Image (cartoon, helix red, strand yellow):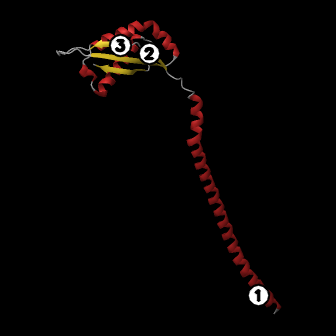
Amino acid sequence: MATKNETQPDADNAGTEGEEATQAPAKRWLSLKLIVIAVAGIAVVGALGGGGYFFFFAGRGNAAPAAEQPKPPVFVDMPDVLVNLSNSGGDRTQYLKVKVVLELPDQAVSAQIQPVMPRLMDTFQTYLRELRATDLDGSAGLYRLKEELTRRVNAAIAPNRINAVLFKEIVIQ
């Protein structure tokens, strides 16, 4: 009987050991699976955070030194221009008075424009005398005038360039 009792507890122990053996790998596999998922989640969050940092902050850090403080433009006043407009068979003579400012990229261009100021005034006079009052109607007419004067000034002072012709005053009488 002793052998029976000894075998019975062994059988009982074997049964519990078998259950423990089957449960231990399941628990170990489950915890390994959780660790892998947690590490993958942390890696994804880290990658998104790093990408967001480079997208929002790293690009700005490089752009600021490259785009140093822009130079303020230089403005040069032109003498007032008063011309009579081209008459298209009408009885009345109309006059155009224009006060213009040239916007220059830097001070060096200003020094180079002063000697050619008579040429610029001649260019303005000859162009403006050929205009009719209807050429200056509306904002589109003034825009065309501004662009044409800018083109003519740039041609007169080549190879230098101006940024724009700005109107201080335009009077058609």
Q: Which residue is mark 1?
A: 8
Q: Which residue is mark 2?
A: 77
Identify which amino acid the numbered label 2 is placed on. Answer: Asp
Identify which amino acid the numbered label 1 is placed on. Answer: Gln
Front-most of residues 64 and 94: 94
Residue 76: horizontal and vertical position, in percent? 46, 16
**Cβ atoms under marks 3 and 2 closer than 8 Å:** no
Between marks 1 and 2, how big is the CA–CA gap? 115 Å
Number of the front mark, 3 or 1:
3
**Cβ atoms under marks 3 and 1 closer than 8 Å:** no
Front-most of residues 32 and 113: 113
Q: Residue at x 30, y 12 (%)?
A: 83
For the residue labelled by badge 2, is the local secondary structure a helix, a strand or a loop? strand
For the residue labelled by badge 3, is the local secondary structure a helix, a strand or a loop? strand
- Taking 50 as reference, is 79 left or right? left
Q: Which residue is mark 3?
A: 81
The image shows residue 32, relative to residue 148, as above or below, that is below
* Figure quadrant of the C terminus: top left
Disc 2 crowd rating (10 Å Cα; few below 14, some 14-19, many 20+) is few
Between marks 3 and 1, how big is the CA–CA gap? 122 Å
Q: Residue at x 59, y 33 (%)?
A: 62
Residue 15: horizontal and vertical position, in percent? 71, 81
Disc 1 crowd rating (10 Å Cα; few below 14, some 14-19, many 20+) is few
Residue furthest right in the image: 2
Residue 168: horizontal and vertical position, in percent? 39, 21
* Figure quadrant of the N terminus: bottom right
Mark closest to the chain's N terminus, 1 or 2: 1
The image shows residue 2, relative to residue 143, as above or below, that is below
Identify which amino acid the numbered label 3 is placed on. Answer: Val
